[in-house]
Image (cartoon, rainbow, N blue to C red):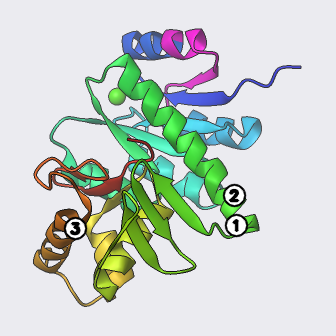
Amino acid sequence: MNNKLVILLVEDEIAISNFISTILTHNNYNVIKADKGKDAIKLTASHCPDLILLDLGLPDMDGIEVLKIIREWSGVPIIVVSARGHEREKVEALDLGADDYITKPFGTSELLARIRTAVRHNHKVREENQLEAEKIIIGALCIDYEKRIVKVEDKEVHLTPIEYKIIVLLSHNVGKVLTHDYIMKEIWGPYLNENQTLRVNMANIRRKIEANPAEPKFIVTEVGVGYRMVDEV
Ligand code: CA
């Protein structure tokens, strides 16, 4: 029986495509390749991959369009591959349902870590839909959803209701980067459109949970994009 995970690699540059597929194959993934957006959509429907690595710059259509179309019917984890400096493109992709992004050029270990997290997160979401988790533990941080308390090294941390909502939102999406807009809409609704309130709250959360708020370990900043709660420390 072949139970390898199947990754659909969507990349039009042959050298990059070959490079990534070699890495993935060596790491026990089955790779199927597409160099056009249209083929990516067809292969997603016909092969039901476990994850898609999607380059946003494709010859026949915008990768963002590919993402939109696939998301109309599929929840498959999608990691978009984007060029350095294209923060707006990344934010757009995340808001349209991409699970994560990786910036070219990237290292092998970074790529593999992102893939593992996206797949694990997808499984976690499925499990949690069946059975609501009571708590989450990430290193010394524990969030107890039932008792509505947060502890660091077994000491209770006193958060405001908004701070608690933010940390719960991030923890429900552990491993995944959430954009500023997404967090603000989830917490404050559609009418708060300046980042300052979120930044202040995040600074307060970090002051309370991080050993060194200037070098946060639990909630990291994705510059120009948003925040991510790590799934292991
Ligand atoms: Ca490209």
Label drawn at residue 208: 3
Vertical placement of 58 versus 198: above or below?
A: above
Residue at image mark 1: 129
The residue carrying pointer 1 sits among few (fewer than 14), some (14 to 19) or many (20 or more) residues within 10 Å by Cα, namely: few
Amino acid under disc 1: Asn
Q: CA distance from mark 2 to mark 1?
A: 5 Å
Amino acid under disc 3: Lys
Check disc 2 and report its element: helix, strand or loop. helix
Name the image quarter holding the C terminus: top left
Q: CA distance from mark 3 to mark 1?
A: 30 Å
Q: CA distance from mark 3 to mark 2?
A: 31 Å
- Relative placement, left or right, of 75 versus 154 is right
The residue carrying pointer 3 sits among few (fewer than 14), some (14 to 19) or many (20 or more) residues within 10 Å by Cα, namely: some
Ligand 1 visible in quadrant? top left
Q: Residue furthest right?
A: 1
- Relative placement, left or right, of 100 versus 30 is left
Whether the residues at callouts 2 and 1 have beta carbons within 8 Å, the answer is: yes
Check disc 3 and report its element: helix, strand or loop. helix
* Residue 225 x/y as whole percent: 23, 55
Q: Nearer the viewer, residue 172 or 3?
A: 172
Residues drawn in magenta: 22-36
N-terminal-most mark, 3 or 1: 1
Residue at image mark 2: 126
Residue at screen point 67% across, 28% down: 6
Check disc 1 and report its element: helix, strand or loop. helix
* Residue 113 x/y as whole percent: 44, 30
Q: Quadrant of residue 104?
A: top left
Q: Looking at the image, can residue 171 be seen? A: yes
Q: Quadrant of residue 193?
A: bottom left
Amino acid under disc 2: Arg
Q: Nearer the viewer, residue 66 or 228?
A: 228
Residue at screen point 45% across, 16% down: 20
